Image: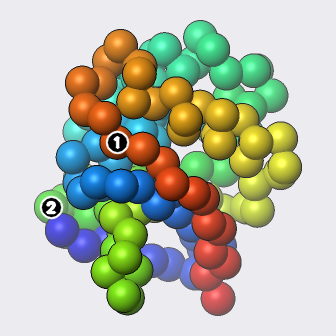
Amino acid sequence: MSVTILPGDSYILLLDTDQYAGNFERELTAWLTGTIGECGIGGLQAAQAITELPVADRKWFEAHVISRTHSDGCSRPTSIWTDPEGKYNSVAIFMDEDPPAQILSGMSVRAKSFPSNKFFTGTPKVLGMRLLRVQ
């Protein structure tokens, strides 16, 4: 599955993981941002996130997380991402603005709690986060 990156995306937040990201990219994105794509996968995680995220963070995600149509025809705010060396299986989250420090900090904290969230049965670990600017 592929997605076309458009200049309007501006930023892609990559969460490097220890497992194949295609098994959980939509659930992790929903857990972090409260956003889901047309397919609805991650709805339980998004509903929980919305109750836990600060209002300011929810508003920021609603305004700045962007969905892209993938090759399967489904529009969603996330995709799997493999770096050129194949070292990381990453989750990409598309944004139209540089996330403020408090947004990144909150996402980092929530990412650490993802393997233990009651709506997901896997055990992926987020190893780190990187922000790419699309030129």
The residue that appears at 23% across and 39% down in the rendered structure is 39
| Circle on res. 124 | 1
- Find residue 99 and report its image quarter: bottom right
Q: Is residue 40 visible?
A: no
Residue 84 vs 5, above or below: the answer is: below
Secondary element at image label 2? loop
Residue 60 vs 121, above or below: the answer is: below
List x then y, in percent, for residue 1.
Answer: 18, 68
Residue situated in front as seen by the camera: 56 or 115 = 115
List x then y, in percent, for residue 105.
Answer: 76, 42
Tag count in the figure?
A: 2
The residue that appears at 73% across and 61% down in the rendered structure is 97
Residue of label 2: 72
Measured Cα–Cα span from mark 2 to mark 1:
24 Å
List x then y, in percent, for residue 4.
Answer: 36, 77
Residue situated in front as seen by the camera: 71 or 21 = 21
Residue 79 vs 26, above or below: the answer is: below
Q: Earlier in the sequence, mark 2 or mark 1?
A: 2
The residue that appears at 65% across and 42% down in the rendered structure is 108
Secondary element at image label 1? loop
